[in-house]
Image: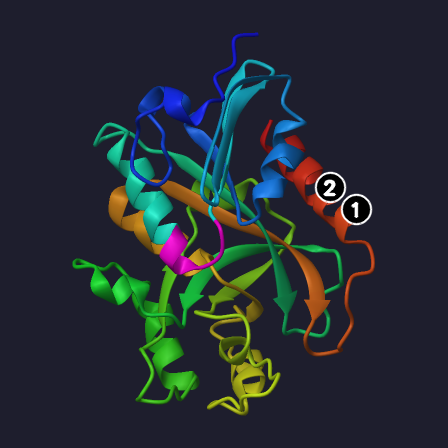
Amino acid sequence: MNMKSSKSEVKGVYHLNLLKENIARDIFLVGDQGRVSEISNRFDSIEFKISNREFTTHTGYIGNKRVSALSTGIGTDNIDIVLNELDSIVSENESLNLIRLGTSGTIQKEIDINSLVVSTHGLGIDNLMHFYANNKFDNELQKAINEQLNWPKELSTPYIYAADPELLSKFDGFTSGITVTAPGFYAPQGRKLRLPYAITDLHERLQSFDSNGLKITNFEMETSALYGLSKLMGHKSLTICTILANRATGEKSNDYKSAIDNMIDTVLTKLY
């Protein structure tokens, strides 16, 4: 197997260091660099590896299907880099399938630890997508968000984007709901170490949201940007998260590795 791996061999886009031929149309996005190899270990063959900063990419085959795994690092700012640079190296009318495999905490007590949650929507309480023109928010849900959350005026207005319906349909029967994308790990998710937070009833506001039976299920830090930028660029995206903590009950996973392994195997089996 002739596999490229040297950083100096590729002179691609600035952060990802990729050329068009280095990536597949199906790309699994993960936050953690270490999770890239956990996915590519399931490949039947690997043809390409590269790493630059927090961005690691492996491309290979599952059967005769060419696939890539790419680490984004944490946060919507990094998703902004990854999506824009991936989009810049594919043809304008070419659509990528971007499947994020993440970790998350649920705010609903009935959702089990180590289970999978599929994000029907990404609710951004960050401000990234407000910097882009021609936004295409989900109007009906956006109205419900505006009416029910009673969001502080000094903070950015929450925005919401839907998952790609075709990718979402492949996971019918899984626990699903709206995923909140926070701009930080502590106060923006209702965690307190030393500094107090501004929204003291954040979890209660989110837990009580209901739009025709659709509820907010979990917190993470990337999905709203993934869904929003994919929508504007014409790519298809979906987030699936392993629940490692239940914020309503205080329960936490005691078998992180097995939970992640289960997520990867479940998703790959569903798709291929």
Picture residue at 53% right of the left edge, 85% below the top: 202
Q: Is residue 239 left or right of residue 262?
A: left
- What residue is shown with label 2? 261
Quadrant (top left, top right, bottom left, bottom right) of the N terminus: top right
Say if the magenta span includes residue 76.
Answer: yes
Count of picture labels: 2
Q: What amino acid is found at the position of numbered circle 1 in the picture?
A: Ser
**Residue 215: x, y in percent?**
54, 71
* 208 and 11: which is toward the camera: 11
Q: Is residue 172 left or right of residue 155?
A: right
Picture residue at 54% right of the left edge, 20% below the top: 60
Numbered mark located on residue 144 in the image: none
Q: What amino acid is found at the position of numbered circle 2 in the picture?
A: Asp
* 249 and 184: which is toward the camera: 184
Q: Is residue 160 left or right of residue 220?
A: left
**Residue 191: x, y in percent?**
59, 80
* 267 and 175: which is toward the camera: 267
Picture residue at 48% right of the left edge, 70% below the top: 184
Quick check: 57 above or below 242? above
Q: Callout 1: helix, strand or loop?
A: helix
- Crowdedness near tag 2: few (<14), some (14–19) or many (≥20) residues, C-alpha within 10 Å: some
Q: Are marks 2 and 1 in contact (CB under 8 Å)?
A: yes
Numbered mark located on residue 258 in the image: 1
Picture residue at 60% right of the left edge, 26% below the top: 272
Magenta highlight range:
73-78
Report which quarter residue 269 is drawn in: top right
